[in-house]
Image (cartoon, coloured by chain):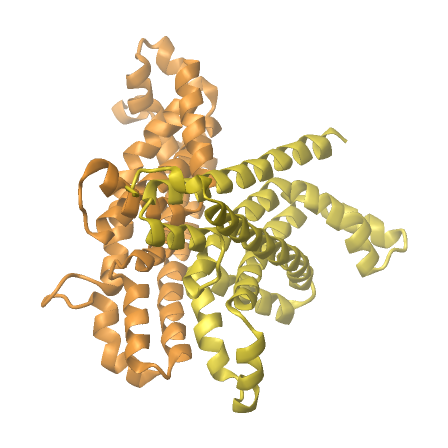
Amino acid sequence: MFTSTTFDILWQRDVQLLFLDGLRVTLELFALSAVAAYALGALLAALHFAGAFCSGLVQAFVGYHRNVPAIVQLMVWYFGVPQAFPASWTGWTDAHLSGFFYAVVALSLNAAAYISEDLRSGFRAVSHGQYEAARALGLGYVATLKLVLMPQAARAALPALVNQALSLFKATSLAMAIGVADVMYIARQVDGATYATFASYLVPTVLYLICTLTLMACGSWLHTRLSAR
Amino acid sequence: MLDILERFGLSLLIGQFPHGPLGGIALTLAMSATALVLAFPLAILVALAREATWRPVRRAAAVYVYAVRGIPLLLLIFWAYFVLPLLTGLDAPASVTVVAALVVYQGAYLGEAIRGAIRALPPGQAEAARALGLGYWRTIYWVILPQALFNCLPSIVNQFILLVKDTSLAYIVGAHEATFAATQINAQLLTKPLQVYVILAGIYFLLCYTLSRLSRMLERRVVRRRARPAASQPSFSEASA
Protein backbone atom coordinates (compact mmCIF):
# COMPACT_ATOMS: atom_id res chain seq x y z
CA MET A 1 0.00 0.00 0.00
CA PHE A 2 1.02 3.57 -0.55
CA THR A 3 1.18 6.50 1.79
CA SER A 4 1.99 10.03 0.75
CA THR A 5 5.53 9.88 2.03
CA THR A 6 6.54 6.51 0.62
CA PHE A 7 9.47 6.23 -1.75
CA ASP A 8 8.71 2.71 -3.04
CA ILE A 9 7.39 3.94 -6.36
CA LEU A 10 10.83 5.23 -7.31
CA TRP A 11 12.03 1.62 -7.69
CA GLN A 12 9.21 0.66 -10.04
CA ARG A 13 10.35 0.24 -13.61
CA ASP A 14 7.29 1.86 -15.24
CA VAL A 15 7.51 4.93 -13.01
CA GLN A 16 11.20 5.32 -13.82
CA LEU A 17 10.44 5.06 -17.54
CA LEU A 18 7.67 7.67 -17.24
CA PHE A 19 10.01 10.14 -15.56
CA LEU A 20 12.75 9.47 -18.12
CA ASP A 21 10.25 10.16 -20.88
CA GLY A 22 9.23 13.38 -19.17
CA LEU A 23 12.86 14.43 -18.83
CA ARG A 24 13.39 13.76 -22.55
CA VAL A 25 10.42 16.00 -23.43
CA THR A 26 11.71 18.75 -21.10
CA LEU A 27 15.18 18.60 -22.66
CA GLU A 28 13.74 18.61 -26.20
CA LEU A 29 11.54 21.59 -25.36
CA PHE A 30 14.55 23.42 -23.97
CA ALA A 31 16.94 22.57 -26.83
CA LEU A 32 14.54 23.50 -29.63
CA SER A 33 13.33 26.70 -27.95
CA ALA A 34 16.87 27.73 -27.01
CA VAL A 35 18.20 27.42 -30.57
CA ALA A 36 15.21 29.34 -31.98
CA ALA A 37 15.32 31.94 -29.20
CA TYR A 38 19.02 32.80 -29.50
CA ALA A 39 18.82 33.00 -33.32
CA LEU A 40 15.70 35.16 -33.24
CA GLY A 41 17.09 37.24 -30.37
CA ALA A 42 20.25 38.05 -32.36
CA LEU A 43 18.11 38.91 -35.40
CA LEU A 44 15.88 41.21 -33.32
CA ALA A 45 18.90 42.93 -31.75
CA ALA A 46 20.34 43.54 -35.24
CA LEU A 47 16.95 44.81 -36.53
CA HIS A 48 16.85 47.24 -33.65
CA PHE A 49 19.73 49.15 -35.22
CA ALA A 50 18.27 49.06 -38.75
CA GLY A 51 16.18 52.22 -38.74
CA ALA A 52 13.36 53.78 -36.72
CA PHE A 53 10.55 51.64 -38.18
CA CYS A 54 12.28 48.32 -37.49
CA SER A 55 13.33 49.45 -34.04
CA GLY A 56 9.72 50.44 -33.26
CA LEU A 57 8.50 46.99 -34.29
CA VAL A 58 11.15 45.29 -32.18
CA GLN A 59 10.23 47.47 -29.22
CA ALA A 60 6.56 46.52 -29.55
CA PHE A 61 7.52 42.83 -29.74
CA VAL A 62 9.75 43.11 -26.69
CA GLY A 63 7.16 45.16 -24.80
CA TYR A 64 4.45 42.53 -25.31
CA HIS A 65 6.64 39.62 -24.31
CA ARG A 66 8.11 41.31 -21.24
CA ASN A 67 4.86 42.63 -19.81
CA VAL A 68 2.60 39.60 -20.25
CA PRO A 69 3.13 36.43 -18.16
CA ALA A 70 4.70 33.59 -20.15
CA ILE A 71 1.83 31.28 -19.30
CA VAL A 72 -0.69 33.71 -20.79
CA GLN A 73 1.44 33.86 -23.95
CA LEU A 74 1.31 30.06 -24.09
CA MET A 75 -2.48 30.15 -23.75
CA VAL A 76 -2.81 32.77 -26.50
CA TRP A 77 -0.79 30.52 -28.83
CA TYR A 78 -2.35 27.20 -27.90
CA PHE A 79 -6.02 28.15 -27.41
CA GLY A 80 -6.27 31.48 -29.22
CA VAL A 81 -4.22 31.52 -32.39
CA PRO A 82 -5.66 28.33 -33.99
CA GLN A 83 -9.07 30.05 -33.86
CA ALA A 84 -7.74 32.72 -36.23
CA PHE A 85 -6.61 30.16 -38.81
CA PRO A 86 -8.85 29.91 -41.89
CA ALA A 87 -11.34 27.04 -41.71
CA SER A 88 -9.61 25.13 -44.51
CA TRP A 89 -6.44 24.84 -42.38
CA THR A 90 -7.95 23.50 -39.21
CA GLY A 91 -8.02 19.88 -40.33
CA TRP A 92 -4.29 19.97 -41.01
CA THR A 93 -3.30 22.05 -37.97
CA ASP A 94 -5.32 19.91 -35.57
CA ALA A 95 -3.66 16.80 -36.91
CA HIS A 96 -0.09 18.09 -37.12
CA LEU A 97 0.45 20.88 -34.60
CA SER A 98 0.64 19.56 -31.06
CA GLY A 99 0.86 21.30 -27.72
CA PHE A 100 4.60 20.69 -27.96
CA PHE A 101 4.77 22.76 -31.16
CA TYR A 102 2.89 25.71 -29.65
CA ALA A 103 4.98 25.48 -26.49
CA VAL A 104 8.20 25.75 -28.52
CA VAL A 105 6.80 28.72 -30.46
CA ALA A 106 5.62 30.57 -27.35
CA LEU A 107 8.70 29.84 -25.25
CA SER A 108 11.18 30.78 -27.97
CA LEU A 109 9.38 34.03 -28.85
CA ASN A 110 9.27 34.92 -25.15
CA ALA A 111 12.94 34.17 -24.57
CA ALA A 112 13.95 35.90 -27.84
CA ALA A 113 12.50 39.16 -26.56
CA TYR A 114 14.62 39.03 -23.39
CA ILE A 115 17.72 37.85 -25.28
CA SER A 116 17.46 40.70 -27.80
CA GLU A 117 17.33 43.18 -24.92
CA ASP A 118 20.42 41.63 -23.32
CA LEU A 119 22.30 41.66 -26.61
CA ARG A 120 21.29 45.27 -27.15
CA SER A 121 22.74 46.34 -23.83
CA GLY A 122 25.78 44.25 -24.78
CA PHE A 123 26.05 46.32 -27.96
CA ARG A 124 25.83 49.51 -25.99
CA ALA A 125 28.80 48.33 -23.95
CA VAL A 126 30.90 48.20 -27.16
CA SER A 127 32.26 51.65 -27.95
CA HIS A 128 31.13 53.37 -31.14
CA GLY A 129 34.77 53.69 -32.26
CA GLN A 130 34.83 49.92 -32.89
CA TYR A 131 32.01 50.30 -35.42
CA GLU A 132 33.64 53.32 -37.09
CA ALA A 133 37.04 51.63 -37.27
CA ALA A 134 35.55 48.49 -38.85
CA ARG A 135 33.66 50.53 -41.42
CA ALA A 136 36.78 52.64 -42.13
CA LEU A 137 38.72 49.42 -42.75
CA GLY A 138 36.23 48.63 -45.50
CA LEU A 139 33.96 46.07 -43.77
CA GLY A 140 30.29 46.22 -44.75
CA TYR A 141 27.45 46.56 -42.24
CA VAL A 142 26.84 42.81 -41.99
CA ALA A 143 30.55 41.94 -41.76
CA THR A 144 31.08 44.63 -39.11
CA LEU A 145 28.20 43.19 -37.15
CA LYS A 146 29.36 39.61 -37.48
CA LEU A 147 33.11 39.99 -37.04
CA VAL A 148 33.52 43.02 -34.81
CA LEU A 149 30.41 43.98 -32.86
CA MET A 150 28.69 40.63 -32.20
CA PRO A 151 31.70 38.88 -30.56
CA GLN A 152 32.34 41.79 -28.22
CA ALA A 153 28.67 42.34 -27.45
CA ALA A 154 28.19 38.62 -26.76
CA ARG A 155 31.08 38.70 -24.28
CA ALA A 156 29.64 41.73 -22.47
CA ALA A 157 26.17 40.17 -22.44
CA LEU A 158 27.31 36.66 -21.48
CA PRO A 159 26.18 36.58 -17.84
CA ALA A 160 22.75 37.88 -18.84
CA LEU A 161 22.53 35.41 -21.74
CA VAL A 162 23.34 32.47 -19.44
CA ASN A 163 20.63 33.69 -17.09
CA GLN A 164 18.17 33.66 -19.98
CA ALA A 165 19.07 30.02 -20.72
CA LEU A 166 18.36 29.27 -17.08
CA SER A 167 15.01 31.10 -17.19
CA LEU A 168 14.09 29.33 -20.42
CA PHE A 169 14.89 25.95 -18.91
CA LYS A 170 12.67 26.69 -15.94
CA ALA A 171 9.95 28.12 -18.18
CA THR A 172 9.63 24.80 -20.04
CA SER A 173 7.73 23.62 -16.95
CA LEU A 174 4.85 25.91 -17.98
CA ALA A 175 4.17 23.69 -20.99
CA MET A 176 2.38 21.26 -18.68
CA ALA A 177 -0.47 23.78 -18.56
CA ILE A 178 -1.26 23.01 -22.21
CA GLY A 179 -0.87 19.26 -21.77
CA VAL A 180 2.74 18.72 -22.87
CA ALA A 181 4.00 15.63 -21.04
CA ASP A 182 7.19 17.15 -19.63
CA VAL A 183 8.74 16.06 -16.35
CA MET A 184 6.41 18.33 -14.33
CA TYR A 185 3.33 16.89 -16.03
CA ILE A 186 4.56 13.35 -15.33
CA ALA A 187 5.12 14.23 -11.67
CA ARG A 188 1.50 15.29 -11.38
CA GLN A 189 0.33 12.14 -13.18
CA VAL A 190 2.41 9.89 -10.94
CA ASP A 191 1.16 11.71 -7.85
CA GLY A 192 -2.41 11.31 -9.01
CA ALA A 193 -2.00 7.59 -9.70
CA THR A 194 0.03 6.54 -6.64
CA TYR A 195 -0.63 9.24 -3.99
CA ALA A 196 3.11 9.10 -3.26
CA THR A 197 3.14 12.92 -3.29
CA PHE A 198 6.49 13.50 -1.64
CA ALA A 199 8.41 11.15 -3.94
CA SER A 200 6.52 12.35 -7.03
CA TYR A 201 7.67 15.94 -6.55
CA LEU A 202 11.10 15.06 -5.22
CA VAL A 203 12.06 13.51 -8.58
CA PRO A 204 11.47 16.63 -10.73
CA THR A 205 13.08 18.80 -8.02
CA VAL A 206 16.29 16.76 -8.20
CA LEU A 207 16.19 16.57 -12.01
CA TYR A 208 15.66 20.32 -12.40
CA LEU A 209 18.43 21.08 -9.90
CA ILE A 210 20.89 18.81 -11.73
CA CYS A 211 20.14 20.46 -15.08
CA THR A 212 20.08 24.07 -13.87
CA LEU A 213 23.18 23.76 -11.67
CA THR A 214 24.99 22.25 -14.68
CA LEU A 215 23.85 25.24 -16.76
CA MET A 216 25.08 27.66 -14.08
CA ALA A 217 28.44 25.86 -13.90
CA CYS A 218 28.82 25.98 -17.71
CA GLY A 219 27.99 29.68 -17.56
CA SER A 220 30.67 30.50 -15.02
CA TRP A 221 33.20 28.31 -16.91
CA LEU A 222 32.45 30.24 -20.13
CA HIS A 223 32.69 33.50 -18.22
CA THR A 224 36.18 32.82 -16.84
CA ARG A 225 37.30 31.50 -20.24
CA LEU A 226 36.08 34.50 -22.20
CA SER A 227 37.19 37.16 -19.76
CA ALA A 228 40.69 35.64 -19.54
CA ARG A 229 41.38 36.65 -23.13
CA MET B 1 -14.28 41.66 -27.71
CA LEU B 2 -16.16 44.61 -26.20
CA ASP B 3 -19.19 42.46 -25.48
CA ILE B 4 -16.98 40.00 -23.57
CA LEU B 5 -15.59 42.89 -21.53
CA GLU B 6 -19.09 44.18 -20.91
CA ARG B 7 -20.39 40.80 -19.77
CA PHE B 8 -17.40 39.55 -17.82
CA GLY B 9 -15.41 42.72 -17.10
CA LEU B 10 -16.49 42.85 -13.47
CA SER B 11 -15.63 39.21 -12.76
CA LEU B 12 -12.22 39.74 -14.37
CA LEU B 13 -11.74 42.75 -12.15
CA ILE B 14 -12.85 41.51 -8.71
CA GLY B 15 -14.18 37.96 -9.15
CA GLN B 16 -17.39 37.22 -7.23
CA PHE B 17 -16.71 39.85 -4.61
CA PRO B 18 -18.73 41.04 -2.60
CA HIS B 19 -21.01 37.98 -2.95
CA GLY B 20 -18.12 35.54 -2.81
CA PRO B 21 -14.36 35.44 -2.40
CA LEU B 22 -12.20 38.15 -3.92
CA GLY B 23 -10.86 37.19 -7.35
CA GLY B 24 -9.67 38.49 -10.70
CA ILE B 25 -7.16 41.30 -11.03
CA ALA B 26 -7.89 42.49 -7.50
CA LEU B 27 -6.71 39.14 -6.14
CA THR B 28 -3.70 39.16 -8.50
CA LEU B 29 -2.66 42.53 -7.07
CA ALA B 30 -3.45 41.56 -3.49
CA MET B 31 -1.39 38.38 -3.78
CA SER B 32 1.54 40.20 -5.42
CA ALA B 33 1.53 42.99 -2.84
CA THR B 34 1.30 40.58 0.10
CA ALA B 35 4.12 38.46 -1.31
CA LEU B 36 6.31 41.54 -1.80
CA VAL B 37 5.70 42.84 1.72
CA LEU B 38 6.39 39.42 3.27
CA ALA B 39 9.40 38.70 1.05
CA PHE B 40 11.00 42.04 1.91
CA PRO B 41 12.31 41.26 5.43
CA LEU B 42 13.37 37.79 4.26
CA ALA B 43 15.25 39.34 1.34
CA ILE B 44 17.08 41.76 3.64
CA LEU B 45 18.14 38.87 5.89
CA VAL B 46 19.28 36.86 2.85
CA ALA B 47 21.28 39.81 1.53
CA LEU B 48 22.96 40.32 4.93
CA ALA B 49 23.62 36.59 5.30
CA ARG B 50 25.21 36.45 1.85
CA GLU B 51 27.60 39.22 2.96
CA ALA B 52 28.14 37.88 6.49
CA THR B 53 31.64 37.40 7.87
CA TRP B 54 30.80 34.03 9.41
CA ARG B 55 31.22 31.40 6.73
CA PRO B 56 28.44 28.89 7.65
CA VAL B 57 25.84 31.68 7.42
CA ARG B 58 27.19 32.71 4.03
CA ARG B 59 27.14 29.10 2.84
CA ALA B 60 23.59 28.46 4.02
CA ALA B 61 22.33 31.62 2.32
CA ALA B 62 24.12 30.67 -0.91
CA VAL B 63 22.57 27.19 -0.89
CA TYR B 64 19.12 28.75 -0.46
CA VAL B 65 19.64 31.25 -3.28
CA TYR B 66 21.05 28.66 -5.72
CA ALA B 67 18.35 26.11 -4.93
CA VAL B 68 15.60 28.64 -5.54
CA ARG B 69 17.26 29.87 -8.72
CA GLY B 70 17.53 26.27 -9.87
CA ILE B 71 13.93 25.11 -9.64
CA PRO B 72 10.91 26.47 -11.53
CA LEU B 73 8.43 28.54 -9.53
CA LEU B 74 5.71 26.12 -10.61
CA LEU B 75 7.50 23.33 -8.76
CA LEU B 76 7.76 25.47 -5.62
CA ILE B 77 4.03 26.13 -5.88
CA PHE B 78 3.38 22.38 -6.10
CA TRP B 79 5.55 21.79 -3.05
CA ALA B 80 3.64 24.43 -1.13
CA TYR B 81 0.27 23.20 -2.35
CA PHE B 82 0.57 19.39 -2.25
CA VAL B 83 3.49 18.58 -0.01
CA LEU B 84 3.45 21.14 2.81
CA PRO B 85 -0.08 20.23 3.97
CA LEU B 86 1.04 16.58 4.13
CA LEU B 87 4.09 17.37 6.21
CA THR B 88 2.56 19.98 8.49
CA GLY B 89 -1.09 18.91 8.58
CA LEU B 90 -2.17 22.49 7.82
CA ASP B 91 -4.77 23.05 5.13
CA ALA B 92 -4.59 26.54 3.64
CA PRO B 93 -6.50 27.93 0.63
CA ALA B 94 -4.74 27.94 -2.75
CA SER B 95 -4.07 31.68 -2.77
CA VAL B 96 -2.32 31.50 0.60
CA THR B 97 -0.07 28.60 -0.39
CA VAL B 98 0.84 30.37 -3.64
CA VAL B 99 1.75 33.52 -1.70
CA ALA B 100 3.94 31.36 0.56
CA ALA B 101 5.72 29.90 -2.49
CA LEU B 102 6.14 33.38 -3.97
CA VAL B 103 7.68 34.66 -0.72
CA VAL B 104 10.26 31.84 -0.73
CA TYR B 105 10.97 32.48 -4.41
CA GLN B 106 11.20 36.27 -4.18
CA GLY B 107 13.23 36.09 -0.97
CA ALA B 108 16.11 34.81 -3.08
CA TYR B 109 15.73 37.13 -6.07
CA LEU B 110 14.93 40.30 -4.12
CA GLY B 111 17.71 39.33 -1.71
CA GLU B 112 20.21 39.29 -4.56
CA ALA B 113 18.97 42.70 -5.74
CA ILE B 114 19.37 44.19 -2.25
CA ARG B 115 22.78 42.53 -1.90
CA GLY B 116 23.86 44.18 -5.16
CA ALA B 117 22.77 47.56 -3.80
CA ILE B 118 24.65 46.98 -0.53
CA ARG B 119 27.82 46.05 -2.40
CA ALA B 120 27.49 49.12 -4.62
CA LEU B 121 27.84 51.43 -1.60
CA PRO B 122 31.34 52.76 -1.02
CA PRO B 123 33.00 50.74 1.79
CA GLY B 124 33.79 54.02 3.56
CA GLN B 125 30.15 54.20 4.68
CA ALA B 126 30.36 51.07 6.82
CA GLU B 127 33.91 51.85 7.93
CA ALA B 128 33.00 55.37 9.05
CA ALA B 129 29.96 54.07 10.94
CA ARG B 130 32.03 51.43 12.72
CA ALA B 131 34.75 53.99 13.47
CA LEU B 132 32.12 56.23 15.08
CA GLY B 133 31.32 53.38 17.44
CA LEU B 134 28.14 51.98 15.92
CA GLY B 135 27.75 48.21 16.25
CA TYR B 136 27.02 45.87 13.34
CA TRP B 137 23.20 46.08 13.55
CA ARG B 138 23.18 49.85 14.06
CA THR B 139 25.51 50.30 11.12
CA ILE B 140 23.17 48.20 8.98
CA TYR B 141 20.01 49.89 10.24
CA TRP B 142 21.09 53.54 10.31
CA VAL B 143 23.74 53.74 7.59
CA ILE B 144 23.70 50.88 5.09
CA LEU B 145 20.04 49.97 4.59
CA PRO B 146 18.62 53.52 4.17
CA GLN B 147 21.05 54.15 1.31
CA ALA B 148 20.98 50.67 -0.24
CA LEU B 149 17.19 50.36 -0.17
CA PHE B 150 16.73 53.79 -1.71
CA ASN B 151 19.15 52.90 -4.48
CA CYS B 152 17.39 49.65 -5.25
CA LEU B 153 13.87 51.12 -5.32
CA PRO B 154 13.70 50.58 -9.11
CA SER B 155 14.63 46.90 -8.72
CA ILE B 156 12.02 46.51 -6.00
CA VAL B 157 9.39 47.78 -8.44
CA ASN B 158 10.80 45.41 -11.08
CA GLN B 159 10.46 42.51 -8.66
CA PHE B 160 6.86 43.57 -8.08
CA ILE B 161 6.26 43.38 -11.85
CA LEU B 162 7.70 39.85 -11.83
CA LEU B 163 5.39 38.99 -8.94
CA VAL B 164 2.31 40.26 -10.80
CA LYS B 165 3.28 38.05 -13.74
CA ASP B 166 4.17 35.10 -11.52
CA THR B 167 0.81 35.06 -9.73
CA SER B 168 -0.65 33.87 -13.06
CA LEU B 169 0.73 30.41 -12.21
CA ALA B 170 -1.66 30.27 -9.27
CA TYR B 171 -4.50 29.35 -11.62
CA ILE B 172 -2.93 25.88 -12.01
CA VAL B 173 -3.67 25.10 -8.35
CA GLY B 174 -7.02 26.88 -8.56
CA ALA B 175 -6.54 30.30 -6.94
CA HIS B 176 -9.18 32.59 -8.45
CA GLU B 177 -6.89 35.33 -9.78
CA ALA B 178 -7.05 37.01 -13.21
CA THR B 179 -5.78 34.08 -15.30
CA PHE B 180 -8.15 31.68 -13.55
CA ALA B 181 -11.03 34.09 -14.16
CA ALA B 182 -10.13 34.19 -17.87
CA THR B 183 -10.02 30.39 -18.17
CA GLN B 184 -13.46 30.27 -16.51
CA ILE B 185 -14.83 32.82 -18.96
CA ASN B 186 -13.28 30.88 -21.83
CA ALA B 187 -14.96 27.70 -20.61
CA GLN B 188 -18.32 29.48 -20.55
CA LEU B 189 -17.99 31.00 -24.02
CA LEU B 190 -16.18 28.04 -25.62
CA THR B 191 -15.95 29.65 -29.08
CA LYS B 192 -13.88 32.76 -28.37
CA PRO B 193 -10.54 31.73 -26.84
CA LEU B 194 -8.54 34.22 -28.92
CA GLN B 195 -10.58 37.22 -27.73
CA VAL B 196 -10.59 36.08 -24.09
CA TYR B 197 -6.85 35.48 -23.92
CA VAL B 198 -6.01 38.64 -25.84
CA ILE B 199 -8.07 40.59 -23.29
CA LEU B 200 -6.19 38.82 -20.49
CA ALA B 201 -2.83 39.58 -22.12
CA GLY B 202 -3.92 43.21 -22.59
CA ILE B 203 -4.78 43.54 -18.90
CA TYR B 204 -1.39 42.20 -17.80
CA PHE B 205 0.31 44.41 -20.36
CA LEU B 206 -1.41 47.56 -19.07
CA LEU B 207 -0.57 46.69 -15.47
CA CYS B 208 3.05 45.74 -15.99
CA TYR B 209 3.79 48.44 -18.55
CA THR B 210 2.54 51.12 -16.17
CA LEU B 211 4.65 49.65 -13.38
CA SER B 212 7.73 49.51 -15.60
CA ARG B 213 7.27 53.23 -16.42
CA LEU B 214 7.16 53.89 -12.70
CA SER B 215 10.34 51.88 -12.27
CA ARG B 216 12.09 53.90 -14.98
CA MET B 217 10.97 57.16 -13.40
CA LEU B 218 12.30 56.04 -10.02
CA GLU B 219 15.56 54.99 -11.64
CA ARG B 220 16.07 58.46 -13.12
CA ARG B 221 15.38 59.99 -9.75
CA VAL B 222 17.83 57.66 -7.98
CA VAL B 223 20.55 58.35 -10.55
CA ARG B 224 20.00 62.09 -10.21
CA ARG B 225 20.19 61.94 -6.43
CA ARG B 226 23.34 59.80 -6.49
CA ALA B 227 25.01 62.11 -9.01
CA ARG B 228 24.39 65.16 -6.85
CA PRO B 229 27.70 66.41 -5.47
CA ALA B 230 28.03 66.17 -1.71
CA ALA B 231 28.75 69.91 -1.42
CA SER B 232 25.25 70.89 -2.58
CA GLN B 233 23.56 68.91 0.16
CA PRO B 234 22.61 71.04 3.13
CA SER B 235 25.18 70.59 5.84
CA PHE B 236 24.84 71.18 9.56
CA SER B 237 26.98 74.34 9.46
CA GLU B 238 24.68 75.89 6.85
CA ALA B 239 21.59 74.95 8.78
CA SER B 240 22.88 76.55 11.93
CA ALA B 241 24.21 79.67 10.22
Please tell me the colour of chain A.
yellow
Q: Residue at x 48, y 59 (%)?
A: A181
Q: Is residue B228 visible?
A: no
Number of marks in the image? 0
Residue B188 picture quarter: bottom left
- Can you say whether B97 is above or below A103 in the image? above
Q: Position of residue A152 (x, y in %)?
A: 73, 44
- Can you say whether B90 is above or below B186 in the image? above
Q: Answer left or right for B214 relative to B15.
A: right
- Can you say whether B194 is above or below B41 in the image? below
Residue A162 picture quarter: top right
Identify by letter the chain in orange: B
The extreme bottom residue here reads A88
Query: Camera-side residue: B215 or B19?
Result: B19
Query: Camera-side residue: A36 or B91?
Result: B91
Q: Position of residue B43 (x, y in %)?
A: 34, 34
Q: Position of residue A160 (x, y in %)?
A: 58, 44
Q: Residue at x 29, y 23 (%)?
A: B142
Q: Residue at x 37, y 9 (%)?
A: B131
Residue B228 picture quarter: top left
- Can you say whether B127 is above or below A51 in the image? above
Which quarter of the rendering shows the N terminus of chain A? top left
The extreme right residue here reads A138
The extreme left residue here reads B19
Q: Residue at x 21, y 73 (%)?
A: B10
Q: Position of residue B239 (x, y in %)?
A: 28, 26
Q: Answer left or right for B98 relative to A125.
A: left
Q: Is residue B180 visible?
A: yes
Which quarter of the rendering shows the C terminus of chain A? top right
